[in-house]
Amino acid sequence: MQLHNDHQSHHRRTGGAPLHSGAPDASGPAVPSGPAVHETPTAGAGAAVVGRERVLEEVLQSLAGTAQGAGCVLVGESGIGKTAVMQHALRHLGDETFVVQVRGSEFAGRTPFGALTFLLSDLDPELSNHPVMILRGLTELIRERANGRPVLLAVDNAEELDEFSAMVLTQMVLNRSAGMLVAFRDFSSAPGEFTGLWRDGILTRVDLEPLTVLEAAAYLGSLLGGKVSRAAAAAIHGYAGGNPQLLSLASSDFQDSGRLRMHNGSWVLAPGEDIRGGRVASAVLNSLNGLSAGQTQLLQLLSMAGSLPLPVVLAQLDSAELDELQEHGMVALDIRPVPDVRISSPVLVRSLRSGLGPARQRRLFEELAPFLNTVEGFVLDDVLLARWLEAIGEVPPAQLAVRAARRATAAGNPDSAVAVLSAAFNTQEENAGAVVELARARTEQGEYGAALGILSRYRGSEAAPDAGDRIRLLLAECRVLCIEATGLRDPRSAAAPAEPARMRHTDLFSQVEDEITALGKTPGIDIVELRRELILARAECHSAHGRFLDNATYLASEEVETAAADLEFRILRSAWLCEAWGMTSRQDDAVELAAQMERLLPGAGLSAGTYARVAGKLLHTYLITGELHACERLLDSAAAAGMEGTYTELGQGLLHAFAGRPEPALAALLPAVDQLAVGGPAAFLPLAAAAAAYCHAMNGRLDEALQYLQIQRGAADGGPWTVRRGARHFAALAEAALGAETGSRRFASLAAQDHKRSAYAYELLARLTAMRLGDEDSLDEVLSVAASLQGDFAALCESYAKGLGNADAQLLLRASEMAGNSGHQLLAREISEHALGIASGAGDRATVRFIHRSRRATGPETAAEAADEILGALTARERSIARKAAAGTSNKKIAEELGISVRTVEGHLYQVYSKLHVGSRRELARTIAEQAGAKK
């Protein structure tokens, strides 16, 4: 079924009312805050309301019991989904409400009562001679047809109503003959009768905002069928904005270009060139047909230049025409020392740019050229200027190309950096700065072999870079060699150049240090900036190889402190320091510093790439210190700041997995795994796959868990130490959940390795997990490690271990409360079960009742959770075997599924029967079933 513009759908009957349209609807997708785009949508009804759940709830609440004399006004740009929301709300009301649908249109709006013609034809002609008589006649006609039911006027495209239709409809609401659900594109242009209803509180206003990236992912998934990775959703959202109709068109553009494709059940973003033209651009450009030639040219100039000073704009366009563009919301004015004009919508910018050929771009550049050196404050952005010159066949000057490439890579767009440098130089090796930036861009693309090849060829040439460029060349080489030293390789490129005598990256760091020291105060070279670059490169190296104690010492040294005047450097240095403190023994200090940095981020003016690096470090700090609520807060603020994509999706999945929430974890992890498999970065694939395997195992989906463990084992084992260590943690958890008896020993081994490298936070996590898997020897280790660390999570672990060791149900209950308060849902439940088992065994009925009451107070119990109560006195392994035995699984089959011997199964069942006071499988099954049934 077509949505929004399919006027045929309005001839259906809803609630017994005839649904009529004044004329075919001309509205369609729109440029956000711009004129309507005349285009027929393709999305289905199911997709149209996805992401609008909150809006629907508001609308339905405003219509609840409306009845007469109340209602809701929906406001939103063309194509935003007003009609879909309205129709969904009407279907929800059903036959209990008599609905009269009215649609305004340009055609019907030219005639008095034009939108109500379908009703007027049923009136006595004598009643059609005066508005008051028409009002009375229509009111009586509708009341008669309603047959005692409440009446709702559903008015779409209300800005197109003629004044007489508007008067009659609003009077029916005022005299309490009907309620109203009315939709406007622009409420500021609404007839006064409607705004009066809103001001008087009769109509509740609900604004339909553009979909967020997360809502767009859900919308696209419903539209396409299947999960959509956050990277794909973010790319399509960036291309089309949050307008549902444009998103629908954009999904087709991305599929046609090969950028959007299905992989293993998920729609993912495939590597490729930016899309030019397409359905979105055509729809948006069609909306500009009513503009003057001067307005169109100004928009084209702005699309290429980014923004222009107001004096330059007024030299191009009359102020009245500029005001008209501003009133339509197409341009905005930024108040600065010299006011700047820019296009409001990135979608319009991209669409305009895609429609400009080289010849037109050249003429536009020539139009602007006279102003470049004559208007105060008029400087084009380096990246935009370099790409503009490239597009018209001009060679960007070397210095401009290098600056533009540096900015593009910092903004997370290394592809643009490579394109700019390729246009500026026949061979980048003729310019040291270009070599540095090209190596950095290739490194960000994951093409490590290519980056090393570029650096090696330059070193083998006769070039003689200045001291600053030489140091940056060495640092670029350090970074690539550091990454490769972690074991990460670029599968797309050949092996690194054969250089047996290549220096280790740690030796290169020493060489850079010596060369910077030797420079002293050489004129023309920014020694402080070079030292900052060296400090950050060393900090990244320490982290990549898991040398956190070294990083904590290094980043707190006087040498680093003296370089910390620059805000961006200070934030980056603090992010590395947060991680180092959180991993070693200063968890409270790490969390406090992370919170300070988090508050600084919104106003720091960081590039997108730097923001992502800092947010990633803070997120890991919060995770490893157990501050799960802080993780949620940071992910929300990062999404609000526009940092959407694979990293955000993976972060959310890991957060839920760590907290023990498998379903929301898998909702994020599964598309993330598919996206990483297609588009990288390769280093994160094992981590995402291992976490997905663990969540599947928690849900009892053994085949799926094994499948994702195979993905984890087959992926490249390289990259930052924290990422590799996280993958090992979740893989070991998955294997333990699948029944491997080596689980606790595996975590004991990981803990010993963590201790050697002073990664005490991971050591505590490993010791705790071994204890949770039944390793009694780990209990004392947990106490020992927890006592040496700061923070609430260490205190929680200590209370848990003490409670278990002393069989203290009250202490365990306090530990369970601590876990629940910090977001560790699974851990809180597990500790509560231990407390329940101890209290039950001791005959402490008061504590048992308290635990049951507490569980019921925190949320409704499922039958499975109720059954868990009867199993609360059992170990995790005993519970697993008890459930299988109660389901009728043979001892031999249980042994095969869990990878243990039949004798071990029999021993566990003996313990189960003894603890639950049953004598057979039948009694066991009946006891569990009765308990579950009693709690339903």
Image (cartoon, rainbow, N blue to C red):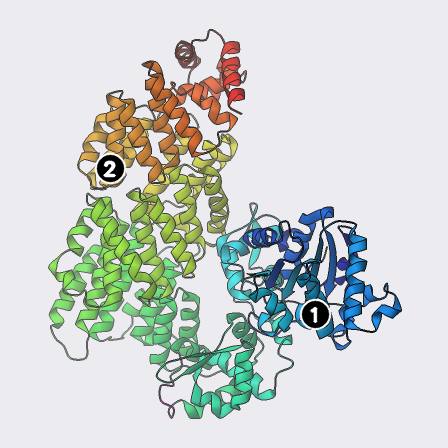
Is 125 rendered above or below residue 49? Answer: below
Closer to us: mark 1 or mark 2?
1
- Give left or right: position of 870 versus 355: left
Front residue of 554 and 628? 628
Does residue 643 appear in the picture of this structure? no
Q: How crowded is mark 1: few (under 14 residues within 10 Å), some or many (20 or more)?
A: many
Does residue 38 appear in the picture of this structure? yes
- Percent position (x, y) of residue 595? 28, 54
Mark 1 or 2 closer to N-term?
1
Is 459 rendered above or below residue 917? Answer: below
Front residue of 597 and 391? 597
- Percent position (x, y) of residue 185? 61, 68
> Three-letter amino acid code at disc 1?
Ala
- Give left or right: position of 496 versus 1: left
Q: Element type at marker 2? A: helix
Q: Do the residues labelled 1 and 2 touch (CB within 8 Å)?
A: no
Kindly identify which numbered label has been placed on residue 794.
Answer: 2
Q: Magenta stretch: give its range.
A: 373-378
- Percent position (x, y) of residue 545? 26, 48
Which quadrant would the N terminus be assigned to in this image?
bottom right
Kindly identify which numbered label has been placed on residue 166.
Answer: 1
Within the image, what quadrant is residue 169 found in?
A: bottom right
Q: Residue at x 46, y 32 (%)?
A: 697
Residue that lies at the very extreme toward the right in this rendered image: 125
